[in-house]
Amino acid sequence: MRIGVLSDTHIPGRARSLPRALLSALKGSDLILHAGDLNALSVLETLGSLAPVVAVAGNTDAESVHARLGRRRLLIVAGCRIGLAHGDGSTGTTQGRALQAFADEAVDCVVFGHSHIPKIERSGAILCVNPGSPTDKRVQPHYTCARLNIHRGVPSAEIIQLSGRTQS
């Protein structure tokens, strides 16, 4: 199972639309996860033309986005339990808040965003994946997304550096 992972697209604030390099990187995905701060629900339609999409709302999303998506999701994909949350809050670290959102769940992987810092790290047995941002790299050297692969119920991930212009 090949899962495209992104977060913090901030459309149309950071880009008018999703970058072509991002859409190219997501082609061939069996599923796409968006970890919040879409800002425009049209992002879901664009991504949905590539693969089924599961998304959560982030701290900059409008109430209508929160009402439609919610703040956290627990998915079971190919035998892997994946927690999806944005990771924002006022205490602790972004990763810590994302893990805390699933503290009462037995998850294999937690996908989160918020910091715009791409990161793949294990916290005990849990694979933590932050895809960074394809439209707002802040101080990071590259615009990014991630790919999550599940083989026999075991998740692995990689960060994908996006090339080219971010605005399309």
Image: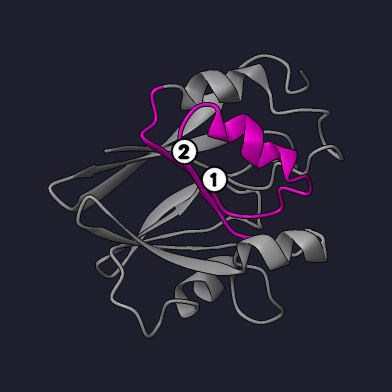
Residue type marked 1: Pro
Please give the range of residues in magenta: 28-57
Disc 1 target residue: 118
State whether residue 2 is above or below residue 119.
above
Q: Name the residue rendered at 39%, 23% in the picture.
A: 28
Q: Name the residue rendered at 53%, 36% in the picture.
A: 145
Q: Position of residue 54 (x, y in %)?
A: 50, 51
Q: Please identify the quarter of the rendering in which residue 72 is found.
A: bottom right
Say which of 27 and 139 sits in front: 27
State whether residue 129 is above or below residue 25.
below
Residue type marked 2: Ala
29 in the magenta segment: yes
Disc 2 target residue: 146
Q: Position of residue 74 (x, y in %)?
A: 41, 67
Mark drawn on residue 91: none
The quadrant of the image that shows the N terminus is top left
Asked if the residues shown at circle 1 and circle 2 are in contact, with their CB atoms under 8 angstroms apart, the answer is yes
101 in the magenta segment: no
Q: Residues within 10 Å of mark 2 (few under 14, many from 20)?
A: many
Ranked by sequence position, the earlier of labels 1 and 2 is 1
